Amino acid sequence: MIDLLIKNAKTIDGKRIEIAVQSGKIHEVGATMTYDAADVSEELDLGGDSYISAGWIDGHVHCFEKMDLYYDYPDKVGIDSGVTTVIDAGTTGAENVGEFHDLAKAAKTNVFALLNISKWGIVEQDELADLSKIQRDLIEEALAKYGDFIIGFKARMSKTVIGDNGIIPLEMAKDIQAQHFKELPLMVHIGSAPPVLEETLSLLTAGDIVTHCFNGKDNGILDRSRGQIKAFAWEHYRRGLVFDIGHGTASFDFDVTETAFSEGMKAHMISTDIYSRNRLDGPVFNFPTTLAKLHVVGYSWSEIIEKVTLVPAEVFKLEGKGQLVAGYDADVTIFDRVESTQTLVDSQGNERQANEWLQPVKAIVGGKQYDINL
Ligand code: ZN
Ligand code: ZN
């Protein structure tokens, strides 16, 4: 028995696609599919108008509601924007990830967490100013207990976070990762110095994630006096560090993104760094707004879709996610391409005009359908 048959859909490249869903998994994918009506519980006919892709994945959000600084609710930053999977980027550490895990399980959206190397996560802005908060044994315990939920580590390496510790917290994070959890990626937040960016990047290994990659700060990848990307940034990009947008309140700059694009450097992954304040007041607002910003810079819609499905699933080793293939989880985003002119604003206040938009209309998580009114 087929639980759901999605008919007459298109991929972002305009190819016709149909999907049969059974017991929360993708049962079959094809250009057209014929089932006996008696074998199909529900049919969803998109009439050739709407697009579908694997469920969108936002690789950098903050959605543990019990925090004061950066907090939100998984479904507000997930399903409500057509995002079927969110990855919370280090809001919690070993001491509070359990409470977050229990709350997150109740969400409609799939939630995973990057464990902050500081044991209480971002309870205060300078979580890495006190090195005694980085405790290997607590991290091991948390991983042993919540190994399905924790899919990597997070370290915020910028001036306001590290106190007088310079690069030391990152050295400790790399040490813990190297000795015990080589398969888990480390996401590093970059911002104002210290530490200087070149030193931060040089400690990372291929597969680690640099979030806020196109921020507009002096300690970023752009050499403003020459109007080009710094040579060392190119070097680390080429040796396999994963560049992630992580838009956030203060970390996405059109000029930097456009200069990088003109030199052939694109972000591998597109994420929002969304939480209640930058969702309600901007400049993030929601996931599709961030996608529209990359489209304005010049990214094609099909590469944008890849950077929010296939790529994050590979980077975070999310089994059964990121592609529409038989046997994978039935996580699907259904959306329209809408033409309308809107002004987009980055974190520095720079404006661009968008003429096209992806408007999510429905999300399916593990075979369950949710209507979206964004
Ligand atoms: Zn950050
Ligand atoms: Zn963040």
Image (cartoon, rainbow, N blue to C red):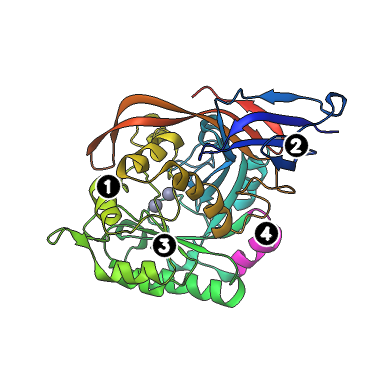
- Does the beta carbon of the residue at mark 2 sit less than 8 Å from ligand 2? no
- The amino acid on which the numbered mark 3 sits, given as a three-letter code, is Leu
The answer to which quarter of the image holds residue 230 is bottom left
Marks 3 and 1, the one that precedes in the sequence: 3
- Which mark is in front, 2 or 1? 2
Residue 147's disc number: 4
Residue of label 1: 253
Q: Which residues are magenta?
A: 137-149
Q: Foreground residue, 164 or 323?
A: 323
Q: CA distance from mark 2 to mark 4?
A: 28 Å
Q: Name which of mark 3 and mark 2 comes first in the sequence.
A: 2
Q: Position of residue 20 (x, y in %)?
A: 74, 36
Crowd class of label 4 (few under 14; some 14 to 19; many from 20; radius 10 Å): few
Instruction: Judge by depth and name the residue closer to the eye, 365 or 13.
Output: 13
Q: Is residue 128 left or right of residue 4?
A: left
Q: Which residue is mark 3?
A: 128
Which residue shows up at 61% across the image and 56% down it?
150
Query: Residue 41 at x, y = what percent?
Result: 81, 26
Q: Secondary structure at mark 2?
A: strand
Tell me, yes or no, whether the highlighted magenta stretch contains residue 145.
yes
Q: Do labels 2 and 4 touch, CB within 8 Å?
A: no
Q: Is mark 3 within 8 Å of ligand 1?
A: no
Q: Residues within 10 Å of mark 3 (few under 14, many from 20)?
A: many
The amino acid on which the numbered mark 1 sits, given as a three-letter code, is Asp
Seen at 36% across and 55% down, the residue is 266
Q: Secondary structure at mark 4?
A: loop
Residue topped by disc 2: 21
